[in-house]
Amino acid sequence: MLNESRELLACLNTRVIACASDDPAQQVLLLENRQRQPGALLCAIPFLRPRDVLTSKAGQSGDEKQLALQEAITEHYQQCYQLACQKRDELGLPLPIIATGHLTTIGATASESVREIYIGTLDAFPAQAFPPADYIALGHIHRPQRVTQSEHIRYSGSPIPLSFDELNSEKSICLVSFAPDTPPQIDILPIPVTQPMQLIKGSLSDIEQQLSVFQNYQGDKPVWLDIELSTQDYLSDMQKRVQAMTENLPVEVLLLRRTREQRMQTITQQDKETLDELSVYDVFERRLATETAMEEGRQQRVRTLFTQVINELENSEPAQ
């Protein structure tokens, strides 16, 4: 999909490198400064799919596949870096070399919204396997952070929170300045918060108390909420209760769920149950309770229709 718009974006001074090229030289780009003079060399390395850099071999163990993929990614980085060094020598200019990457590195702290990208093959890429570029700009991890205390290897992170567990980390971008024969100067520029968001945890009474503070909220936008309910009770009307609490408040509940511990306990408890212990109505209510985004009116209509179906089945004559 990205490659389809590559030629159009090229007219807008935007280069698209959607996948690893058979010719790594195509991934080494010369970046100009504001004076239209050579300013830096970029090793534009996107997300590297295993099939782009690796030939699968039959009979390999899981560890062997993991090592082979790591070595293939390392080799691709080294090829691009060496080509950038050659281009720098040809230009005869002390240009910095910047590399990009879309992967998880060892020691990086992820959030709930980050997906595993090398499923079953590569858990994380070691930072020491990167080439000695002047700066390495990484993507995929949403929290801004350095990699293994290396100032020049960084995730700038997502510009906005992509999950509620990212609210405690300030969003930012990195302004990197280069000078010959000196380490890059990195300035962290905070990104202003444009949408208020908040995570609320606790029992129903705790949540009601925490919601009361929004009665005096004076912001221009409603607060987006993630509500995690911690209770041992099975509440089929959890959605209805929370909706009543927030009805006249300047908030929008985007996510309503039980805490992870409660969800695991519920799953464990249900695993021990058998259908013989549950009525058809119990099974139906359990399933309906998972639809936390369904409005109460619609839930009631679904209950009515379900009851009608059960009554028809129970009152129908058996087939001859």
Image: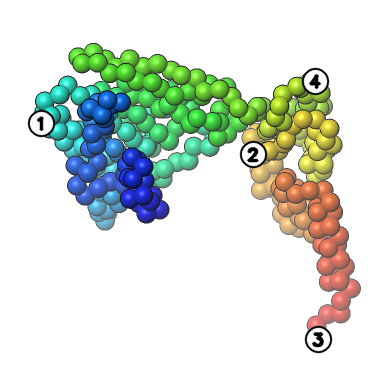
Q: Badge 2: how crowded within 10 Å, few (<14), some, or many (20+)?
A: few
Amino acid carrying mark 1 in the image:
Glu
Work out whether residue 83 or residue 47 is closer to the camera in this orientation and state it. 83
* Image coordinates for residue 105, horizontal then vertical, percent: 37, 31
Q: Nearer the viewer, mark 4 or mark 2?
A: 4
* Image coordinates for residue 307, horizontal then vertical, percent: 86, 62
In the picture, the quarter occupied by the C terminus is bottom right
Q: Decide which of tag 1 and tag 2 comes sooner along the chain.
A: 1
Amino acid carrying mark 2 in the image:
Met
Determine whether, in the image, residue 138 is placed left or right of residue 54: right
Q: Which mark is on residue 216?
A: 4
* Image coordinates for residue 117, horizontal then vertical, percent: 41, 43
Vertical order, 154 against 317 (above or below): above
Outermost residue, front side: 35
Q: Decide which of tag 4 and tag 1 comes sooner along the chain.
A: 1
Question: Secondary structure under badge 3?
Answer: loop
Residue 245 visible? The answer is no
Q: Decide which of tag 3 and tag 4 comes sooner along the chain.
A: 4
* Image coordinates for residue 30, horizontal then vertical, percent: 23, 34
Q: Residue at x 30, y 51 (%)?
A: 51
Q: Which residue is mark 3?
A: 320
Q: Which mark is on residue 264?
A: 2
Q: Badge 3: how crowded within 10 Å, few (<14), some, or many (20+)?
A: few
Q: Nearer the viewer, mark 1 or mark 3?
A: 1
Vertical order, 180 against 121 (above or below): above
Gap in Å between the C-alphas at discs 2 and 3? 46 Å
Q: Which mark is on residue 90?
A: 1
Q: Nearer the viewer, mark 4 or mark 1?
A: 1
Looking at the rendering, which quadrant does residue 217 occupy? top right
Gap in Å between the C-alphas at discs 4 and 2? 36 Å
